[in-house]
Amino acid sequence: MAGSSRPLEVGIEATAKKAFAWAVEWPGWCRAAKTEELALEALAEYLPRYREVAATAGVRPPGLKSADSFDIVERVTGDASTEFGVPGKVVDHDATPVTAAQATRLSKLVGGAWVVLDRIAAASPASLRKGPRGGGRDRDKMLDHVIAAESSYGRKLGIKLPVESYADKDKVNTLREQILAVLRRASDGAPLVERGWPYRYAARRIAWHVLDHVWEMEDRSS
């Protein structure tokens, strides 16, 4: 549906206090807000920023005119993780089969998110502007947090490679290569390892976490 004028398929994970909205076929394009309606508005607002990811990945960017162009195809009730700020629910679509062509496309988008992260990190100051309540990690701690999370996510794909520092480029690159090697494969939709994540959820969770911090870094660098 890249470049299409058809409604964009989205999923919703929501509680009474917080909601996530994500583009089903565009891993990482995911936004949260206090309500479903506000999350959808935020998703639309972030399209120009997500287009950078698609362009970097060599994937034709999504077409969208407004929040009215959304087709909600998945809706799931969230939990404490949702309210904490993590889209942690696996939905039915996450467990659907992935063809080789789909796997190639989705893995490119995950890889594109990493390239954008590296680009923004290189252009950002070490000390970032504090958040509205005076909090937030500075650049290097944020990057270490991202890569440590990816090391943890890797175990959900059967990858066991502890990485704690973004500065350890050899390990970072090895971890990314191993994750992409898994994501490039076609899948029947089942979790990739015992007690692991299905393909589609792994792709959207990994890319969401990367881009959530990319956009935070951008906003707090200005």
Image (cartoon, helix red, strand yellow):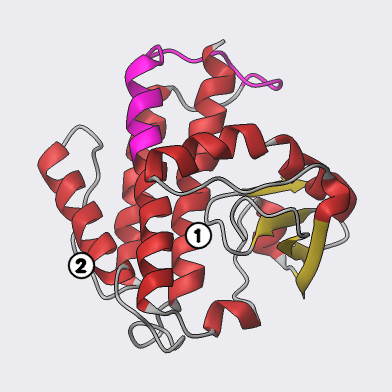
Q: How many marks?
A: 2
In the image, the segment drawn in magenta is: 115-134
Q: Is residue 37 left or right of residue 134?
A: right
**Residue 35 in view here:** no
Please give the name of the residue rendered at 20% of the width and 67% of the height, measured from the top-left corner.
160
Q: State the quadrant of the N terminus.
A: bottom right
Q: Residues within 10 Å of mark 1 (few under 14, many from 20)?
A: many
Q: State the quadrant of the C terminus.
A: top right
Up-down relation of residue 138 to residue 203 (above or below): above
Would you identify the image quadrant in which residue 178 lies?
A: bottom left
- The amino acid beneath tag 2 is Lys
Q: Is residue 135 left or right of residue 176?
A: right
Up-down relation of residue 47 to residue 88 (above or below): above
Q: Is residue 118 magenta?
A: yes
Task: Give yes or no for contact between labels 1 and 2 (Cβ–Cβ under 8 Å).
Answer: no
| Residue topped by disc 2 | 160
Q: From this viewpoint, which residue is outermost toward the left?
A: 170
Q: Is residue 32 left or right of residue 169?
A: right
Up-down relation of residue 137 to residue 77 (above or below): above
Please give the name of the residue rendered at 74% of the width and 53% of the height, measured from the top-left corner.
5
Disc 1 versus disc 2: distance between alpha carbons?
Answer: 18 Å
| Residue topped by disc 1 | 205
State the image coordinates of residue 25 (x, y, percent, origin top left).
Answer: 58, 63
Query: Is 134 in front, or is 25?
Result: 25
State the image coordinates of residue 35 (x, y, percent, origin top left).
Answer: 87, 51
Q: Which numbered disc, 1 or 2, marks the residue that appears first in the sequence?
A: 2
Query: Is 155 in front, or is 204?
Result: 204
Please give the name of the residue rendered at 88% of the width and 51% of the height, measured from the top-left corner.
68
Up-down relation of residue 46 to residue 120 (above or below): below
State the image coordinates of residue 42 (x, y, percent, origin top left).
Answer: 76, 40
Q: Is residue 8 magenta?
A: no
